[in-house]
Image (spheres, helix red, strand yellow):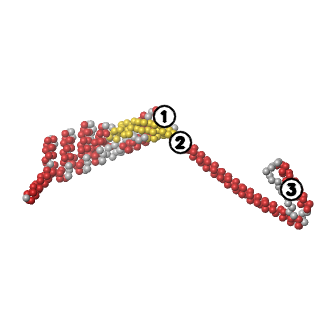
Amino acid sequence: MILAVVIIVAIIIAFLLFLYYFPLGLWIRTIAAGVPLSIGSLIRMRIIGVPAGVIVSNLVRARKAGIPLTVDQLQSHILAGGNVENVTLAMIAAQRAQIPLEWQRAAAIDLAGRNVLEALQTSVTPKVIETPTFQGVAQNGIQLNVKARITVRTNLDRYVGGAGEPTIVARVGEGVVSAVGAAIDHKEVLEFPDRISKAVLAKGLDAGTAFEIVSIDIADVDVGKNIGADLQTSQAEADRRIAQAKASERQYAAMASEQEQKAETQRMRAKVVEAEAQIPQAIAEAFRAGNLGVMDYYKLNNIKADTEMRNAIGQGPNTDTPPQAPPQNPL
């Protein structure tokens, strides 16, 4: 019993391996589709790890569309990591649209990481790219917010190695800002927005890219800030602060100079007080030496009192001036 079970299991495994390595269903399908492949070719695909079903499906699809693809081309593309189905469908679509597309170019586009079928569809039906809002400033200082729609068509000759959509959008944005900046008045742009499109298209912005720019349409133009007035206001505010700082600097310098003058005045007054303090001593010394008599001293006081009276008469009434004390006798 055990031997019989082992034999049955071995027979089943052998039969399954036979069906896997000898794909009779695929072979019959190729014969029915009119694209006969030898059973040896199908077995070889199984051995090298190529999905025979994918090869057969795309080969039948291509032959029915009249595209002379070979098994070796499909196998080499799969082994290179390509998407055979996308390339085959792109070849069929190119033939229907009467667009020249060779297998080598289609396979190169696919291996470059690009979707060859999407590229072909964009080549047949142009694609519209919505741009973000570009901000430009006219020469009169008014800011304009511009949105554009870029209609592009795939250029299959430059699709491999060409720049993508971000480059197109960046170049168009640069052209829009430049065109708005060239306008003397922002009203010119609002009145004739097609001038921006013509100016941008004239620059040949699609050079070196994977696309061909069909048209650039201005979708929306809005008036933004008055940048010129804001700049003038900012400049005036900056000038005011500079002038205020300079005025404060001069004020502080004047205050410092005033304080220095006051200090100098106090120093000179101190010298005067010091000198006046020596006068009574000098008079007393003159009395002792006999160089000054009593009458001379009284005459000196009379002259001093007469001088103070004349000064008071000349200055007029001044209630704020406190009465001066009579001169004291140094003796």
- Residue 302 x %, y %: 89, 56
Mark 1 burial class by Cα count in 10 Å: few <14, some 14-19, many 20+: some
State the residue lying farthest toward the right. Answer: 295
Q: Is residue 186 above or below residue 252?
A: above
**Location of residue 243 in the rendering, given as x and y in whole percent from the top left corner:** 61, 47
Q: Write the residue at 44% across / 34% down.
A: 193
**For the residues marked 2 and 1, what is the alpha-carbon distance in whole angstroms?**
19 Å
Residue 326 image point, x, y percent: 85, 57
Q: Which residue is mark 1?
A: 187
Tag shown at residue 54: none
Name the amino acid type tagged 1. Answer: Lys
Q: From the viewer's perspective, is the residue at label 3 or at label 1 nearer?
A: 3
Q: Quadrant of residue 213?
A: top left
Q: Report the front residue among 51 and 93.
A: 51
Q: Is residue 311 above or below residue 194?
A: below
Answer whether residue 182 is visible to the viewer in this image: no
Residue 275 appears in which quarter of the rendering? bottom right
Q: Amino acid at mark 3?
A: Lys
Kindly identify which numbered label has been placed on residue 304.
3
Residue underneath mark 2 = 230
| Residue 2 x/y as whole percent | 9, 59
Badge nearest the viewer, 2 or 3: 3
Q: Which one is earlier in the sequence, the residue at label 3 or at label 1?
A: 1
